[in-house]
Image (spheres, rainbow, N blue to C red):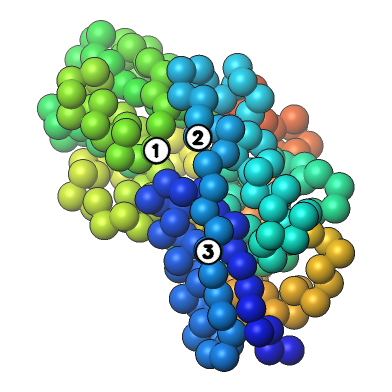
Amino acid sequence: MNPKKLVIASRESLLAMWQAKHIQGRLKALYPDCEVEILGMTTRGDRILDRTLSKVGGKGLFVKELEQSLQDGRADLAVHSIKDVPMDLPEGFALAAISERANPFDAFVSNRYARLEEMPEGAVVGTSSLRREAQLRARYPHLLIKPLRGNVQTRLSKLDNGEYDAIILAAAGLQRLELDERIRMILSESDSLPAAGQGALGIEIATHREDLYEVLKPLNHDTTHACVTAERALARALGGSCQVPLAAYCTEETGC
């Protein structure tokens, strides 16, 4: 099937738009005669920056507006960072494809310290994630962990303004925005086990659009899909949400 036009729903942050444009480029390469547009929008999660996600409704705040655009026909598909997608999608929606995973780990970003273990007692680390906070508190109880909200640029600006001594961000986001030079170190699994699906992009559709499964199938990466599905299943079984500090990371082993 060769579609004539596809509309991608996306948040309007630089990172989200990079991700949408990445999928747009792949679709144009697959279907040269197809017009592929991006519908940018600001979600409730983007607007609420003074409270942590665990206190204002969780990850669903980043996807509800995009899902509404799928439901009312303004968009055909929505592109998400899988780690920001709730473990249970609302009825009538599905992940039609999961792209090949980029770097799944967290990055340590600091203007003062080269490594996390070098930080002295009372040094301030910013993170928006209960998962990251719990692991940092367990391994580095001498550090002061403070909430950090906003897009990548906003978080880096707060670091540069001296509000934090270091911040923890997803490495994939920094690398996609060509901000590799801001990364002082990639955190190991023992320091910060990733969130379920971290580093992968998910393509969501309304389930009544059965025509899109075949269209989007070439974007799916089988190994990533299997690993992310396992991670999300574990997180779902353990009640994973923004209110639970839960990590999950799966890799494929050959020859078993």
- Where disc 2 sits, the SS reads helix
Q: Is residue 150 left or right of residue 131?
A: left
- CA gap between label 3 and label 1 equals 19 Å
For badge 1, the amino acid type reads Asn
Residue that appears at 39% across and 24% down:
148
From the top left corner, tell me how far across and down residue 143 is, in percent: 31, 14
Question: Which quarter shows the C terminus?
Answer: bottom right
In the image, which is nearer the foreground, mark 3 or mark 1?
Answer: 3
Residue closer to the observer: 121 or 128: 128
Where 161 sits versus 81, above or below?
above
Q: Earlier in the sequence, mark 1 or mark 2?
A: 2
Query: Looking at the rendering, which quadrant does residue 113 occupy?
Result: top left
- Where disc 3 sits, the SS reads strand
Residue closer to the observer: 239 or 36: 36
Q: Earlier in the sequence, mark 3 or mark 1?
A: 3
- The residue identified by callout 2 is 46
Q: Are marks 3 and 1 in contact (CB under 8 Å)?
A: no
Q: Earlier in the sequence, mark 3 or mark 2?
A: 3
Where 155 sits versus 183, above or below?
above
- The residue identified by callout 3 is 38
For badge 2, the amino acid type reads Asp
- The residue identified by callout 1 is 151
* Crowding at mark 1 (Cα within 10 Å: few <14, some 14-19, many 20+): some
Residue that appears at 37% across and 16% down:
145
